[in-house]
Image (cartoon, rainbow, N blue to C red):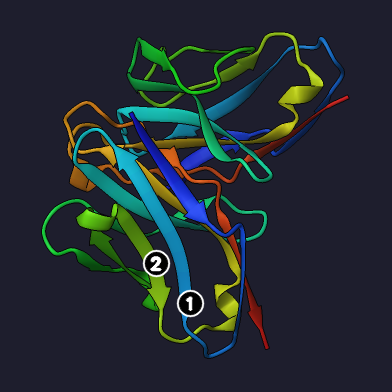
């Protein structure tokens, strides 16, 4: 079984400020973790993923996330927010075992950028 | 490459009507899935398939039916539409098995309203 909790359904930051979107997961097997972004009226696009290896993963558009097993967290950060970052962000988890392709999503965090 | 194509983009139904949401992918992905997206609830898995002739239920399968006769197509059928099925539906596909390749590609979505 697996689940994802995203803390904060809405986050607002000023342009140029740090972006921090929180994600905690639960998984009965070692997890693979993903962040997806959804721009208005579009489907979801992959931002970054953690499967194995380095726990700090870098994604597109300057985003990065760190897998912390001890804290069961995979928080998404960006040092300096840009207006184009306004979107909804989803954290997702699947089990790291063959045949377990089902991806479980969190409820999403809507990011607003204040000019 | 067209990626994942969903039709129709918009549909209005009356309670009790049936319809099929179409999903086609041209990437030779083994894994295909349907999600529904509702405000504050993130994406919830309806049904999924790991290959032609194989389907399984996700988190919210009631009221929906699927089949997978070819690798490319994965239609979602609403048997008798209810207002609770008003939602945005996303089809997504990926390669199967290898976690490194297990990145879902999403369609643009189908917005369904049931009156």
Q: Secondary structure at mark 2?
A: strand
Residue A1 seen in the current view:
yes
| Residue A114 position in % (x across, y down) | 67, 83
Quadrant placement of the N terminus of chain A: top left
Residue A55 x/y as whole percent:
18, 63
Q: Camera-side residue: B35 or A3?
A: A3
In the image, residue A16 above or below residue B114:
below
**Residue B7: horizontal and vertical position, in percent?**
64, 33
Which chain does the residue under circle 1 lie in?
Answer: A
Quickly name the residue at label 1: A19
Circles 2 and 1, Cβ within 8 Å, touching? The answer is yes
Q: Secondary structure at mark 1?
A: strand
Left or right, residue A42 beside residue A56: right
Specify whether B13 is left or right of B70: right
Quadrant position of residue B93? top left
**Residue A61 x %, y %:** 41, 75
Q: CA distance from mark 2 to mark 1?
A: 8 Å
């Amino acid at each position: 079984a697996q689940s994802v909790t995203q803390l904060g359904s809405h986050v607002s930051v000023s342009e140029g400020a740090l972006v921090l979107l929180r994600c905690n997961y639960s998984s009965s097997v070692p997890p693979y973790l993903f962040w997806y972004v959804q721009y208005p009226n579009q489907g979801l696009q992959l931002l970054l993923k953690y499967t194995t290896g380095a726990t700090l993963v870098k994604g597109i558009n300057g985003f990065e996330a760190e897998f912390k097993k001890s804290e069961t967290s995979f928080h998404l950060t960006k040092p300096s927010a840009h207006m184009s970052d306004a979107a909804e962000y989803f954290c997702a988890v699947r089990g790291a075992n063959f045949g377990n392709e089902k991806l479980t999503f969190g409820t999403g965090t809507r990011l607003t950028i204040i000019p | 490459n067209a990626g994942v194509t969903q039709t129709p983009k918009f549909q209005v139904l009356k309670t009790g009507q049936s319809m099929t949401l179409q999903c086609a992918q041209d990437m030779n992905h083994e894994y295909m899935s349907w999600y529904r997206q509702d405000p504050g609830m993130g994406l919830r898995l309806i049904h999924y398939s790991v290959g032609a002739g194989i389907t399984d239920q996700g988190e919210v399968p009631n009221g929906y039916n699927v089949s997978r006769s070819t690798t490319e197509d994965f239609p979602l059928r609403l048997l008798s539409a209810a207002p609770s099925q008003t939602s945005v539906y996303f089809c997504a596909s990926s390669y199967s098995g290898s976690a490194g390749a297990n990145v879902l590609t999403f369609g643009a979505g189908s917005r369904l309203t049931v009156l």
